[in-house]
Image (cartoon, rainbow, N blue to C red):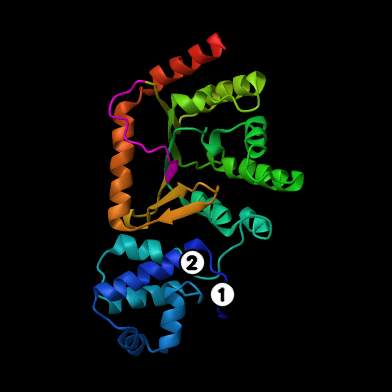
Amino acid sequence: MPPTNNPTLRQRRLGAELRKLREKAGFTVTRAAEHLGVNQGRVSMIETGRSPVSADLVRGMASAYDCSDKALVDALAAMTGRRRRGWWDEYREHLPAALVDLAELEHHTTALRVALVIHIPALLQTTDHARALFRTVVPPMRQYEIEHRLTYRIKRQGILHREDPPSYSAIIHEAALRMGFGGPSVAHGQLTHLLDMGELPHVTIRVIPFGTDHFPSTGQSFDYLTGAVPQLDTVQLDTHHGGCGFLDAEAQLAKYRAVLDHMTSCALDPTESRNFIHNLIRKA
């Protein structure tokens, strides 16, 4: 199969995990190539995500590297082969690659935990709220850019309405609920939408009110996407310029799991959070 010049994040992640297995086994690229019966260039391209790899070859690599973690090997094997195009691929010419990669990650995640201080979670935003938000971006977006972002965001939200949705847990600070993007009518519709989404059995919404002690956040929003096995979890960070940063080192994953657990302990429970949002609507 021909090499891929622009591998997706998922393809790069598969290669990176195979590299980790090789390095853990103490194999050089040369030694790995000899064991696998391929040239060194093929091994290098597999590890950078530029060369498609079969499930059989992944299992052969895992065996050569003496990896006995069957769940991990099965998960890596499931990531192989020629990647099927998803709806997100139609946006690769219009949006930053990291944003498109995020949609692919969400499609494959088994659970999603998000924490936000200033903004409503993207997957819980109304169309009007999202449009108002995009109009505040600096430098300003052209109208067609706003529409691309808007349709992309709406399609991302589809994972919460499919037949096998991932569990979704959102921790939202009171500040985000009071920002009022788009004016009173849009804000009212957004808060009502949060209540509606919270009724879904796989969606949990918790609010951190003002005045909460020991609030463990610097204000940066982030998503924790659960993979098929813990080694394939990913943290996505929103950057100041609106892009995405992805983290997957074991220490980084552990840090953000701890932050999420701490934030959960600071938040109201789902019923209290629902009542809190109800009161905001009533007082508006």
Please give the label number shown on residue 37.
none
Element at label 2: helix
Pointer 1 residue: 4
Q: Looking at the picture, how far across and down is residue 91, in whole percent?
A: 66, 55
* Callout 1 secondary element: loop
Q: Residue 183: x, y in percent? A: 65, 22
- Mark 2 lies on residue: 11
Instruction: Determine the residue positioned at 45% across, 37% down.
Output: 168
Is 147 on the left-hand or right-hand side of 133? Answer: right
Q: Which residues are magenta?
A: 211-223
Contact between marks 2 and 1 (CB within 8 A): the answer is yes
Above or below — where is 248 with respect to 156? Answer: below
168 lies above or below 59 = above
- Estimate the x, y position of residue 58 in percent, counting from the top left: 39, 73
Foreground of the two, 88 or 64: 88
Real-space Cα separation, disc 2 to disc 1, in angstroms = 9 Å
